[in-house]
Image: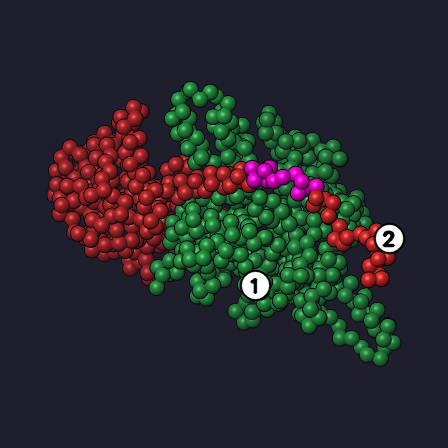
């Protein structure tokens, strides 16, 4: 038997905002770090600027050292703040890898500095968004097999893993709609029996980052004294700590106006440049931030369908025999669904739409045939934030996983094209 | 990052997390694997939140190494000396592991600085256990005591079924690493990396570093070693350690650098592969750009004109067509 198969597989879920990494078989990822790389680019510019007559060997070795001189995650943020030599690069944008050099470096640090494992010893499970191009999968395979020499690779589709995370021992429900609201992309993906219904995937141009931007804008317009260079980070922290979903905007405004002491929170921070402490108030943005998903018109004028309407459209476009099952199992995943009561609000709004449709059809038929009520169920679980990772961990610890992987031998025989297709998309067509 | 850190990052994070939320009882059960097949297992139960069970499994030793009771010789004493008071060694260890330690958080020193130092030390448990025999040998060098295994060949495990060799002498200790790699490309890269490594030692700034040598055939010191231990596809690296390299605090660093030497080389081989790929990608991109520029402009303008999917017929033509 392959000795690598006896060791736990490495599961890395690269999101736009955060990367979750760890070993299969655990309940939590080992590390959750921001997907960012701080690269030292001072050497590159220098080499170009100076004349060739200077000692090129010294420059060459300095350049080689600079190649190892980078940081990822929280360390990257800290480094770029303390010195101007490092530039921040975000390798993933809107759920797609944009900068492969940075991505390769990011993986390198994930494997050697964070997980500290030998990539030759482990199978790898990586994730991708449902709309990833085949070329990007090929690139991933190439980097993983060529650079890191891994024995086997499986690239899983995030929503399928999120469904697998709800996997309880008694029943394994692999039919459902996954509402994946990440930092960079929002997808509504219907899955039937583990196969993605590719033609019905809906995307929304509003994601976690937009919530942050909206909060930042609200605070700026109210004139809170947040230093401009820090305001995005503060908005992000406010979003993560204080935001919640309200049931009705007008009522919520009234509540805030009646008892400001109860609802308005204080934020304390230190100015990064001068070191002076400051405070600011957090008011309506606590519930207005998440409201962006339910009434997008308050944030952008280009896009105005609320999330529940998009989910409903998505299910209505799926094959008719799967629709009831899809309504029954709507699974939330991604960090931006973590707002308090997000699932309640979603369920209520969706139920309203569905009930209205049932009533309308009853009226049209004139009461001769009664439609069976449709069960709408939004599932939320405490591990929503890393549901995709947990699904990967569950999948990676099954013995079938090692058979489903693309192996190094296959890669050497056929090349990167083995990663082009993903079996979960095949079933329905 | 040039050198690998000696402590396990995840273990340190878990310990810190536990120490900061001591009053909150949680159920923890983590297991993970590090390079060279060192496995960890951490368990905390709801009932005793201030106790933590840490189990460690080591790479399978090759036959030539001395491995009494599933641990390198002197490991138990080293663990006892390093974590006096807070750690208890459980016997027998957890099933499938070589060593199980019971940590008691209530006995940790209250002083923040000392506590941090202790945590880092616990997180580098791998080095304390696996590096124990090497540390003992190097200690003899500083104290100038004559140990029983003078001039004898000592094999120490560092990877599954692989060992490196230590030859203690009166004035110096010679450490020889047979380097093996699975992949053929890795082997080539590692060979040139090691040659470069030996070259780099000769530059002026590194006069005080331990002298090191690389050769493709086994050095003379390994005459007595078993034949199968001498099969190495990337040659042999030997270091000569003098007493000045193990004085005082330098001992810890020397032990950790030597015991992670193979992982260090393998990390840099992977880094250079990544480096080459970056260059290759950049080259491909520039070539594609050049190709795009080389396309004749005629084609472009033609494309624009033919953008409509159907050909518009003039009235006359349409008329003619309908009659034909």
Residue drawn at x 65%, y 47% as measured from the top left: A208
Q: Position of residue B12 (x, y in %)?
A: 42, 45
Evaluate whether residue B144 shows in this view: yes
In the rendered view of the protein, which quadrant contains the C terminus of chain A? Answer: bottom right
- In the picture shown, does residue A359 fall above or below A231? below
Q: Is residue A125 left or right of residue B257?
A: right
Please name whichever residue, A41 or B100, is drawn nearer the observer in this view of the structure: A41
The residue indicated by pointer 2 is B315
Q: Is label 1 in a helix, a strand or a loop?
A: helix
Residue drawn at x 47%, y 38% as measured from the top left: B279
Residue A62 painted magenta: no
Calculate the distance from the C-alpha at mark 2 to the C-alpha at mark 1.
52 Å
Q: Position of residue B56 (x, y in %)?
A: 34, 53
Please, what is the dominant secondary structure of the magenta stretch?
Answer: helix
Chain letter belonging to callout 1? A
Residue drawn at x 39%, y 60% as measured from the top left: A5
Q: Is residue B149 left or right of residue A300?
A: left
Please name whichever residue, B122 or A389, is drawn nearer the observer in this view of the structure: A389
Q: Which mark is residue A424?
A: 1
Q: Is residue B215 left or right of residue A3?
A: left
Determine crowd level at label 1: few under 14, some 14-19, many 20+ residues with C-alpha closer than 10 A: some
Chain letter belonging to callout 2? B
The magenta region covers: B289-301
- In the picture shown, does residue B127 fall above or below A179? above
Evaluate whether residue B110 shows in this view: no
> Residue B118 appears in which quarter of the rendering?
top left
């Amino acid at each position: 038997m392959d000795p690598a198969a006896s060791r736990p597989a490495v599961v890395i879920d690269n999101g736009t905002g955060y990367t979750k990494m760890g070993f299969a078989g655990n309940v939590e990822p080992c590390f959750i770090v921001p997907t960012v790389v701080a690269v030292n680019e001072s050497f590159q510019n220098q080499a170009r600027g100076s004349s060739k007559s200077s000692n090129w060997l010294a420059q060459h070795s300095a350049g080689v050292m600079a190649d190892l001189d980078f940081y990822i995650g929280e360390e990257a943020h800290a480094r770029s703040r303390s010195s101007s030599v490092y530039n921040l690069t975000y390798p993933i944008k809107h759920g797609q890898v944009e900068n492969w050099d940075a991505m390769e470096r990011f993986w390198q640090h994930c494997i050697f500095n964070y997980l500290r494992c030998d990539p030759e010893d482990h199978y790898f499970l990586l994730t991708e968004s449902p709309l990833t191009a085949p070329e990007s999968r090929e690139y991933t395979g190439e980097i993983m097999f060529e650079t890191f020499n891994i024995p086997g690779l499986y690239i899983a589709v995030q929503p399928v893993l999120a469904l697998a995370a709800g996997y309880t021992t008694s029943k394994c429900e692999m039919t459902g709609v996954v509402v994946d609201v990440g930092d960079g992309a929002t997808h509504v993906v219907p899955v039937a029996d583990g196969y993605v219904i590719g033609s019905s995937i809906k995307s929304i141009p509003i994601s976690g980052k937009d919530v942050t931007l909206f909060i930042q804008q609200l605070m700026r317009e109210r004139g809170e004294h947040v230093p401009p260079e820090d305001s995005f980070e503060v908005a992000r922290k406010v979003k993560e700590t204080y935001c919640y979903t309200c049931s009705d905007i007008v009522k919520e405004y009234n509540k805030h106006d009646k008892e400001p002491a109860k609802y308005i929170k204080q934020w304390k921070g230190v100015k990064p440049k001068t070191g002076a402490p400051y405070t600011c108030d957090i008011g309506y943005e606590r519930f207005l931030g998440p409201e962006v998903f339910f009434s997008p018109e308050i944030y952008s004028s280009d896009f105005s369908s609320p999330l529940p309407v998009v989910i409903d459209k998505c299910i209505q476009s799926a094959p008719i025999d799967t629709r009831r099952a899809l309504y029954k199992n709507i699974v939330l995943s991604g960090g931006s669904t973590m707002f308090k009561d997000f699932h309640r609000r979603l369920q209520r709004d969706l139920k309203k739409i569905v009930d209205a449709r049932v009533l309308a059809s009853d009226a049209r038929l004139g009461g001769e045939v009664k439609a069976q009520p449709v069960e709408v169920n939004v599932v939320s679980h405490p591990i929503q934030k890393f549901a995709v990772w947990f699904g990967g961990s569950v999948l990676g610890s099954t013995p079938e996983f090692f058979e489903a992987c693309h192996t190094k031998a296959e890669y050497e025989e056929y090349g990167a094209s083995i990663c082009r297709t993903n079996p979960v998309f095949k079933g329905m067509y | 990052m040039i050198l690998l850190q000696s402590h396990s990052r995840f273990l340190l994070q878990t310990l810190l997390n536990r120490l900061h939320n001591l009053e909150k009882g949680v159920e923890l059960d983590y297991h993970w694997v590090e390079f060279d097949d060192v496995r960890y297992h951490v368990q905390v139960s709801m009932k005793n939140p201030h106790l933590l069970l840490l189990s460690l499994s080591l790479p399978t030793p090759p036959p030539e190494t001395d491995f009494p009771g599933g641990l390198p010789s002197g490991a138990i004493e080293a663990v006892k000396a390093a974590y006096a008071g807070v750690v208890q060694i459980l016997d027998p260890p957890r099933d499938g592991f070589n060593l199980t330690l019971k940590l008691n958080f209530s006995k940790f020193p209250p002083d923040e600085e000392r506590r941090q130092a202790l945590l880092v030390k616990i997180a580098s448990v791998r080095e304390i256990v696996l590096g124990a025999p090497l540390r003992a040998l190097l200690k003899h060098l500083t104290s100038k005591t004559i140990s029983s295994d003078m001039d004898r060949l000592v094999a120490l495990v560092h990877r599954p079924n692989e060992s490196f060799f230590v030859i203690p002498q009166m004035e110096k200790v010679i450490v020889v690493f047979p380097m093996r790699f699975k992949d053929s490309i890795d082997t080539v890269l590692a060979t040139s990396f090691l040659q470069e490594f030996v070259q780099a030692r000769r530059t002026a700034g590194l006069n005080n570093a331990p002298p090191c040598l690389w050769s493709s055939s086994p050095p003379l010191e390994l005459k007595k070693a078993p034949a199968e231990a001498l099969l190495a596809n990337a040659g042999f690296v030997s270091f000569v350690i003098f007493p000045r390299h193990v004085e005082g605090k330098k001992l810890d660093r020397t032990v950790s650098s030597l015991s992670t030497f193979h992982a260090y080389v393998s990390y840099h081989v992977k880094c250079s592969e990544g480096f080459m790929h970056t260059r290759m990608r950049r080259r491909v991109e520039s070539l594609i750009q050049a190709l795009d520029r080389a396309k004749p402009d005629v084609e472009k303008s033609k494309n624009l004109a033919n953008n409509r999917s159907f050909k518009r017929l003039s009235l006359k033509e349409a008329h003619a067509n309908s009659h034909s």
